[in-house]
Image: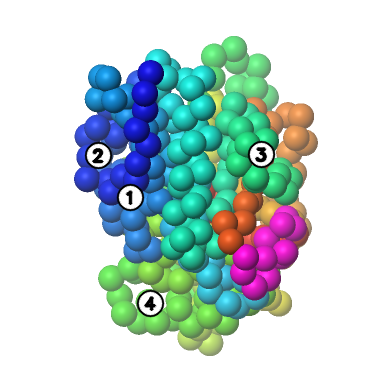
Amino acid sequence: MNYQIKKNDCSNLEELITLSKSYYSTGDIIDKRYLEWQYLKNPYGLPFLFTSKDTLTDQLAGQYLVIPLEYQISGEKLAGSLSLNTLTHPDHQGKGLFTKMAKATYADCEASNNNFTIGFPNPLSYPGFVKKLNFSHLGDIPLLIKPLKPINILRSYFQKEKEKHGGEIILEQVSSKKNIHQLDFHNQTDENKYNAFWNKIMSNYPISANKDFKFLKWRYNDHPTKKYKVYYIENNGEIDGVIILRAEHVWGFKVGLIMDFMTNEPSKNSKFLLKHASKIFKNLKLDFITALHTPIKEYNILKKNNFYKIPQKLLPQKIHFIVRSNKKFNNEEMILKLENWKLTFGDYDIF
């Protein structure tokens, strides 16, 4: 078979969805609203996307893409990207298309000064990324849980049939005696307060996504298929900490997810945010709360507040973290050490 590999401008979303349906029967990747949000409304630009087409049938055979994002390394803002939604039609696998599309994508990244790409590959795609595409596996990200209903956890653990991801669980408002508020994405005062908070704390993380108000609004407020709540706690009129929450059915459990957790350290207010999250999740009668976090500041705060690290052998799926450089840039060596990264559920697209 002959294949044409070329850059795709995302003007053919319906065709991309048809390709995805050859591999997935459900999920965001076949939802046009989601792809419009992820590909066309990303404030950092269109994806670096290459597709392969069977020239005899004019059928799309595969896609490889990364979406551009902005990161900060020691306070310096740099263009980076996140790998996601890679797939090859079952009829066209084994033809080397994955590697050819990927190399074209990363050549485009280099030409566009997109400095590096990160990814969270599943076990099937992991070998291809590391062996063929010059990704480095920095390690596996720890998963922490705080049990709310231990008996339910034990019972569900032994069930034979477990649905990987079920339905959304809508979060309800709860009162707080502390100075905790929900972030209003349409309020200029909240925007100014949050940006001041982020600008103050971002250099505390050697490397992280640039989680300014623009990013938070796109990632959590504008998301078309998932619902999040962003809470902050104030101290003397300034934001002192932020926590981002959602809940859903995962692996047979009813789970509260801490999507992100950011604090101004040292601060005793971090524990009040965690108590507020626990109160919300307990009211919904969830089984446990979980947080994905690299072992830096907030990770230690979570552990001090009754969150426990799950042994890797008990995880349904290890959460690999991989990185590749697309070009030479300042502080390039820093991206190759997991201890430099602040990574949470909010840093990739599954949740």
Label annotation for residue 190: 4
The image shows residue 300, relative to residue 32, as above or below, that is below
Q: Residues within 10 Å of mark 1 (few under 14, many from 20)?
A: many
Q: Kindly identify which residue carries mark 1.
A: 39
Q: Please state which amino acid type lies under the numbered disc 1.
A: Tyr
The verdict on residue 351 being magenta is no
How far apart are the alpha carbons under marks 4 and 3? Answer: 42 Å
Quadrant hosting residue 304: bottom right
| Mark 3, residue position | 130
The residue type indicated by label 3 comes to Val
In the structure shown, which secondary structural element does the residue marked by tag 4 occupy?
A: helix
Furthest residue toward top: 160
Element carrying mark 1: helix
The local secondary structure at tag 3 comes to: helix
| Quarter of the picture holding the N terminus | top left
Residue 331 location, quadrant: bottom right
Gap between marks 1 and 3 measured at Cα: 25 Å
Q: Which of pointers 4 and 1 lies earlier in the amino acid sequence?
A: 1
Magenta segment boundaries in residue numbering: 328-338
